[in-house]
Image (spheres, rainbow, N blue to C red):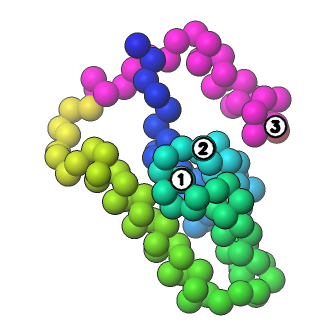
């Protein structure tokens, strides 16, 4: 059985790109998860989430916007993702997660390779 995409992990990956200032990469990751339940809970729409990245970028590159407002919005985003994860996965301790990983089928392996090597999806290098 093929595991569903781990949207919460992909979303956190995008958040980390935003925090480190890699805004284009953050936009790509937000775009990848825009239709997911967790992203919808935080932003409601792709435009809202990507717009937040744009406001953060504007603050750091052009000194536009209110840093305090953006910091509170960032904290709300992170807290909402963590709360969603706790609701979905609980607070249990996993000492061995080897059975949680599922080998992707051939079609998904090809899709991943195409995204890494370029020319497909959001990441056209």
Q: Inspect this view and state whether residue 26 appears.
A: no
Q: Quadrant of residue 101?
A: top left
Please state which of the two labelled residues, at mark 3 or mark 2, is closer to the viewer: 2
Query: Viewed as shown, does residue 101 lie left or right of 27?
Result: left
Could you say whether the residue bearing mark 3 is in a helix, strand or loop? loop
In this figure, which residue is indicated by the disc labeled 2?
35
Disc 2, disc 1: CB below 8 Å? Answer: yes
In the image, the segment drawn in magenta is 98-124
Q: What x and y, as percent, mark residue 120?
A: 78, 29
Q: What x and y, as percent, mark residue 36?
A: 54, 44
Could you say whether the residue bearing mark 1 is in a helix, strand or loop? helix
Residue in the image at 42% along x and 63% along y: 80
Compute the Cα span from label 2 to label 1: 7 Å
In this figure, which residue is indicated by the disc labeled 3?
124
Please state which of the two labelled residues, at mark 1 or mark 3, is closer to the viewer: 1
Q: What x and y, as percent, mark residue 66?
A: 65, 89
Q: Quadrant of residue 44?
A: bottom right
Disc 3, disc 2: CB below 8 Å? Answer: no
Q: Inspect this view and state whether residue 90 appears.
A: yes
Q: Nearer the viewer, residue 58 or 95?
A: 58
| Screen quadrant of the C terminus | top right
Residue in the image at 17% along x and 46% along y: 92
10 Å crowding of disc 1: few (<14), some (14-19), many (20+) = many
| Screen quadrant of the N terminus | top left
- Of the numbered discs 1 and 3, the one sitting upstream in the chain is 1
Residue 38, magenta (yes or no):
no
């Amino acid at each position: 059985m093929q595991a569903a995409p781990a949207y919460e992990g992909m979303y956190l990956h995008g958040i980390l790109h935003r925090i480190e200032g890699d805004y284009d990469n953050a936009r790509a990751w937000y775009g990848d998860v825009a239709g997911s339940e967790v992203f919808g809970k935080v932003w409601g729409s792709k435009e809202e989430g990507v717009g937040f990245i744009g406001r953060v970028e504007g603050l750091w590159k052009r000194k536009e916007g209110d840093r305090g407002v953006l910091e509170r919005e960032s904290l709300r985003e992170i807290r909402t993702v963590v709360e969603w994860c706790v609701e979905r996965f609980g607070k249990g301790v996993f000492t061995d997660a080897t059975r949680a990983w599922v080998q992707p089928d051939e079609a998904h392996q090809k899709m991943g390779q195409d995204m890494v090597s370029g020319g497909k999806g959001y990441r056209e290098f």
